[in-house]
Image (spheres, rainbow, N blue to C red):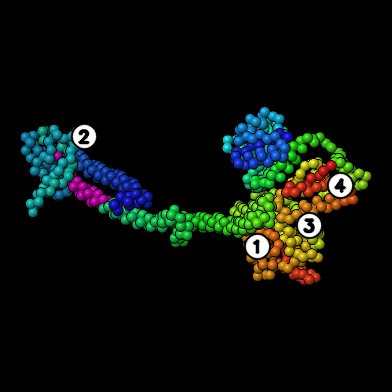
């Protein structure tokens, strides 16, 4: 996918461009908000990755301008500080997700891909299908093949998120933020325990494990 | 240079200004009194002279020059305040108590019907002293060529006026002297008080925040200023010392994890060189350590910010929802460790707070409890309203607990008790909980747990007590 990286720190930008390119993406770099805006106007991007602090036009200004122009391309906001206010300002300006520097590449890539995917799967779905796993969002039922799987409400939400991002890596932080809707450091592997419970329900007794652990990143649901 | 510097002082300048105003006003009053008295006295004398002149001309008119002469002689002998002189048509003196006409008729100013003038009457007393006294008089030409002069010595009035003037000048001089002295005194006093304040300001400029202005408890405005200055300095000193303390603490806090990271990297390097691990593993270790350090750094920063600025972006929220979510999140992790996890959450516990920070605080408490409770133990999360109305989260475990004498210490940064060193952790968990509690106007209370629990105990109960949301906010 095509990604526009708007970042004034040359080293951070180089690393980001390299990391995203190696993950198979087509990356363009703009050195500040003003150039970012010019580049965004050319169109054709799937995701904008925008730094908050920049000379001339900063991230908030750029995202606001982009949104005013009717451009709905997903925006991942980057900031050096994990301040609550910063997150709120970023999201208010029109950003879709927020990442605190310094971050792990796996986290950046997972979030960028999740944003791009969310765009593709627009529209209301009532049934999610990944391989032989099927989730009915109306009846709140899950089947793998012909076997009905009984899930707790939170497990259902967790699986729904994984199915919506099937084939992509999702990190533990993303799961805590998107499924539990909390922003804090849980200190231990609480998410892993929830995943392993879900895994035992959807994979146990089947030939192939769908819910896979991605080393250094998180998890991935494979068809 | 004493006077010029004194002249620059505001109180002294004000004194001088008021003194000048007073002198001008007093001078104006004095001048008015002087002129009013003078003209009043002169007017009275002139009226007297006029009456006398009227009587004499009437005598002359009705009974002739001889009768007038007779009357003048009588009056001169009898004595009185008046001056008389009658001259014949040839200008020779006929009678009177003056040796010559005091002024020429032609020089006299014409006023009303008569010829008025003021003059100085010169007389020589027996001692030979010449005295010139102010007088007024009128010259009246009479039918038949004679000329009559009637006047009055008004030297007494002049003496009175000059005494009055002297007295007033004296009073004014005294006022000026007293005013000047008062001005000097006030100015000195103010200067002394100001000098104290100035010294304080100067010392603060030079970086000494310990100085305080002298306060005399007189309740005047300078005292108020001094007290205000002292209060300001107290706050300034407190915030400076808290900043310095935070800076020191951060520097100190980061030294140990940095040292640890360096040591681990060195070991990794030696191991990699020796071929025990490969370069990728060594980099993996380095990355893990860097992440750990960043986490520590973020926590230290969060604590410093909470301590400096309180809880950011507080919102009214239900403490019960947070407790239920945290219980749901942590329950599987506890059960994986064979710990019986239970939650007891009352409904509708409204507080005003920052949800991410409160979640972090609860996570730290629950994580600690699970970490230090051996398998087979129990952890309980409670959220309830205290009888005081405060909202209390508490996490109770059946671990080894914290001895009473250590309870104050464990909430400090990086304090880890000896028996906890085998568990991973930064030693910042409880410090953050305390910072979160205090930023919300609450507190953290450490207590003994439920007592012996099988082979374990006595356990630990950590309570996070928060003020309820004010009624108006809900």
Residue B333 tag number: 3
Discs 1 and 3 lie in a common subunit: yes
| Pointer 4 chain | A
Q: Is residue B153 magenta?
A: yes
**Going 34% across and 54% down the picture, which residue do you hit?**
B183
Query: Within 10 angstroms of label 4, few (less than 14), some, or many (20 or more) residues?
Result: few
Residues marked 4 and 2, same chain: no
> What separation in Å lies between label 4 and label 2 (alpha carbons)?
142 Å
Q: Marks 3/2: CA distance?
A: 126 Å
Figure check: A164 above or below A45 = below
Q: Nearer the viewer, mark 1 or mark 3?
A: 3
Query: Which of the 4 image quarters holds residue B199?
Result: bottom left
User: How many angstroms separate mark 1 from mark 3 (CA)?
Assistant: 24 Å
A112, above or below B433, in the image = above
Which region of the structure is painted magenta? B147-169
What residue did someone put label 2 on? B111
Q: Nearer the viewer, residue B147 or A11?
A: A11
Q: Chain of mark 1?
A: B
């Amino acid at each position: 996918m095509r990604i526009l990286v708007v970042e004034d720190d040359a080293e951070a930008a180089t690393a980001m461009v390299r990391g995203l390119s190696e993950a198979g993406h087509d990356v363009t770099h703009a050195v500040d908000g003003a150039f970012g805006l010019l580049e965004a106007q050319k169109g054709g991007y799937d995701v904008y990755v925008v730094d908050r602090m920049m000379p001339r036009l900063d991230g908030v200004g750029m995202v606001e301008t982009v949104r005013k122009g009717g451009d709905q391309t997903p925006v991942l906001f980057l900031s050096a500080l994990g301040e609550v206010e910063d997150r709120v300002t970023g999201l208010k300006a029109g950003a879709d997700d927020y990442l605190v520097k310094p971050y792990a590449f796996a986290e950046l890539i997972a979030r960028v891909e999740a944003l791009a995917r969310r765009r593709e799967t627009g529209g209301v779905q009532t049934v999610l299908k990944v391989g032989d796993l099927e989730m009915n969002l109306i009846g709140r039922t899950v089947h793998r093949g012909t076997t009905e799987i009984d899930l707790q409400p939170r497990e259902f939400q967790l699986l729904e998120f994984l199915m919506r991002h099937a084939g992509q890596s999702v990190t533990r932080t993303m799961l805590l933020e998107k499924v539990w809707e909390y922003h804090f450091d849980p200190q231990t592997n609480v998410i892993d325990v929830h995943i392993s419970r879900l895994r035992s329900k959807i994979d146990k007794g089947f030939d192939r494990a769908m819910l896979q652990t991605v080393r250094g990143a998180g998890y991935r649901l494979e068809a | 240079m004493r006077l010029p510097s004194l002249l620059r002082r505001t109180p002294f300048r004000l004194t001088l200004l008021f003194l000048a105003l007073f002198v001008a006003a007093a001078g104006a009053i004095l001048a008015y009194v002087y002129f009013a008295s003078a003209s009043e006295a002169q007017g009275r004398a002139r009226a007297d002279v006029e009456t006398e002149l009227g009587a004499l001309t009437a005598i002359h008119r009705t009974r002739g020059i001889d009768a007038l002469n007779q009357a003048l002689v009588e009056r001169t002998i009898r004595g009185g305040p008046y001056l008389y002189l009658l001259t014949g048509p040839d200008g020779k003196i006929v009678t009177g108590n003056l040796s010559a006409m005091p002024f020429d008729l032609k020089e006299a100013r014409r006023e009303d019907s008569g010829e008025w003038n003021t003059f100085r009457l010169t007389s020589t007393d027996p001692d030979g002293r010449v005295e010139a006294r102010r007088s007024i008089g009128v010259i009246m030409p009479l039918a038949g060529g004679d000329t009559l002069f009637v006047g009055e010595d008004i030297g007494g009035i002049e003496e009175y006026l000059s005494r009055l003037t002297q007295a007033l000048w004296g009073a004014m001089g005294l006022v000026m002297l007293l005013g000047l002295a008062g001005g000097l005194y006030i100015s000195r006093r103010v200067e002394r008080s100001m000098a104290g304040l100035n010294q304080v300001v100067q010392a603060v400029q030079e970086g000494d925040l310990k100085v305080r202005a002298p306060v005399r408890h007189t309740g005047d405005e300078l005292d108020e200023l001094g007290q205000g200055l002292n209060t300001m300095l107290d706050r300034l000193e407190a915030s400076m010392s808290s900043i310095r303390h935070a800076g020191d603490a951060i520097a100190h806090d980061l030294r140990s994890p940095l040292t640890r990271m360096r040591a681990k990297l060195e070991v990794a390097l030696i191991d990699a060189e020796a071929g025990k691990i490969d370069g990728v593993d060594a980099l993996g270790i380095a990355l893990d350590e860097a992440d750990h350090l960043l986490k520590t750094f973020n926590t230290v920063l969060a604590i410093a910010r909470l301590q400096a600025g309180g809880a950011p972006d507080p919102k009214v929220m239900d403490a019960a929802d947070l407790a239920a979510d945290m219980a749901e999140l942590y329950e599987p992790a506890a059960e994986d460790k064979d710990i019986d996890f239970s939650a007891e959450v009352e409904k509708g516990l409204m507080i005003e707070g920052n949800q991410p920070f409160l979640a972090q605080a609860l996570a730290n408490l629950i994580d600690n409890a699970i970490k230090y409770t051996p398998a087979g133990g129990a952890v309980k999360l409670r959220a309830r309203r205290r009888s005081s109305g405060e909202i209390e989260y508490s996490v109770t475990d059946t671990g080894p607990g914290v001895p009473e004498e250590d309870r104050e210490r464990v909430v400090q940064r990086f304090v880890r008790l000896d028996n906890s060193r085998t568990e991973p952790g930064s030693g910042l968990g409880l410090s953050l909980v305390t910072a979160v509690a205090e930023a919300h106007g609450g507190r953290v209370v450490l207590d003994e747990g439920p007592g012996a629990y099988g082979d374990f105990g006595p356990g630990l109960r950590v309570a996070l007590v928060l003020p309820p949301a004010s009624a108006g906010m809900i």
